[in-house]
Amino acid sequence: MKLTKGLKNSGRKKAGGELVSKPAEPVVSLQSGHQTSSGSQTVTIEAKIDVGFGNTLFLRGEGQGLNWEQGVPLECLDGSTWQWSGKTSDNLKFKLLLNDTVWAQGENLTAAPGQKVQISPAF
């Protein structure tokens, strides 16, 4: 199963004809994964974004040891790919943060057991 939420970036004009664009919403893609023998399944959250040298993406949420008070750092795979994985038998609710202080724009996201969620967050 693959779901994709499109990028919204509609522009509107101010008085004087200047084009002002609204902030883009994150792009989310979900893919099915594989179940482990214990009934738990691996959930992978992958963020595609260049956050700049010295910055880190963090994950906060509910489920799999996550909480809304303190984030867990994602692993930097390359200059624009960050990843976190964990095994769970319940849905995860989550949100990404830049340096565990700046929340990503948009609503909280949900990942089901066995899914790989790919997101391009906007801050």
Image: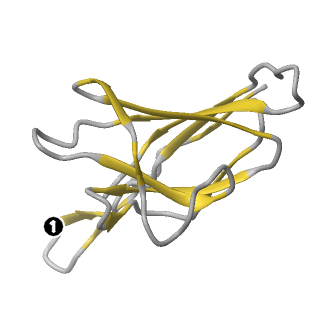
At 87% across and 27% down in the image, what residue appears? 38
Front-most of residues 38 and 8: 38
| Whole-percent x, y for residue 81 in the image | 34, 28
Q: Residue furthest bottom?
A: 15
On the image, the x and y values in percent for residue 2 come to: 72, 27
For the N terminus, the image quarter is top right
Residue 49 picture quarter: top left
- Residue 77: name its quadrant: top left
52 relative to 12, above or below: above
Left or right: 5, with 1 as reference point: left
Q: Secondary structure at mark 1?
A: loop
Could you say which quadrant of the image residue 35 lies in?
A: top right
Q: Hey, which residue is sitting farthest front in the picture?
A: 38
Does the image show residue 7?
Answer: yes
In which quadrant is the C terminus drawn?
A: bottom left
Colouring: secondary structure
Q: Amino acid at mark 1?
A: Glu
Foreground pick, 100 / 2? 100
Can you identify the residue that label 1 sits on?
Answer: 18
Q: Residues within 10 Å of mark 1 (few under 14, many from 20)?
A: few
Viewer can see residue 115: no
Residue at figure coordinates x 46%, y 49% from the top left = 26
